[in-house]
Amino acid sequence: MELMEYTSRLFRFVDDVEFYLDDERKVIDFRSASRTGYSDLGVNRKRMETIRKKYALSGPGMLF
């Protein structure tokens, strides 16, 4: 498992992101969560979708 931390530009809120590579299934599972507050107005979802798209374009043959 790989843990990462992202900080928002405007308010400097910290989000935790986890990645888990399942070699057997050839899948990368990931999740992102805000440390504070109840809503991030879709920022985590947008970030993860951007990462997913960039990874898919890199062509490693992995599935999400």
Image (cartoon, rainbow, N blue to C red):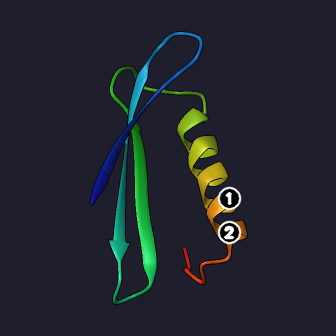
**Residue 52 vertical position relative to residue 46 in the rendered view, above or below:** below
The residue singled out by tag 2 in the image is: 58
Mark 1 closeness class: few <14, some 14–19, many ≥20 residues within 10 Å: few
Numbered circle sitting on residue 36: none
What type is the residue that disc 2 sits on? Answer: Ser
What type is the residue that disc 1 sits on? Answer: Lys
The one nearer the camera, 10 or 61, is 61
**SS assignment at label 2:** helix
Q: Which residue corresponds to the image point at 52% horizontal and 27% vertical from the top-left?
A: 40
Q: Which residue corresponds to the image point at 61% horizontal and 60% vertical from the top-left?
A: 52
Q: Quick check: 51 left or right of 12?
A: right
In the image, residue 46 lies at what x, y percent? Answer: 64, 43
In the image, residue 5 lies at what x, y percent? Answer: 38, 35
Label 1–label 2 contact, CB within 8 A: yes
| Residue, far left | 1
In the image, residue 12 lies at what x, y percent? Answer: 47, 13
Q: Which residue corresponds to the image point at 56% horizontal and 49% vertical from the top-left?
A: 48
Q: Which residue corresponds to the image point at 59% horizontal and 42% vertical from the top-left?
A: 47
Q: Quick check: 59 left or right of 48?
A: right
The residue singled out by tag 1 in the image is: 54
The quadrant holding residue 33 is top left
In the image, residue 22 lies at what x, y percent? Answer: 34, 78
Locate the C terminus and report the quarter of the image it occupies: bottom right
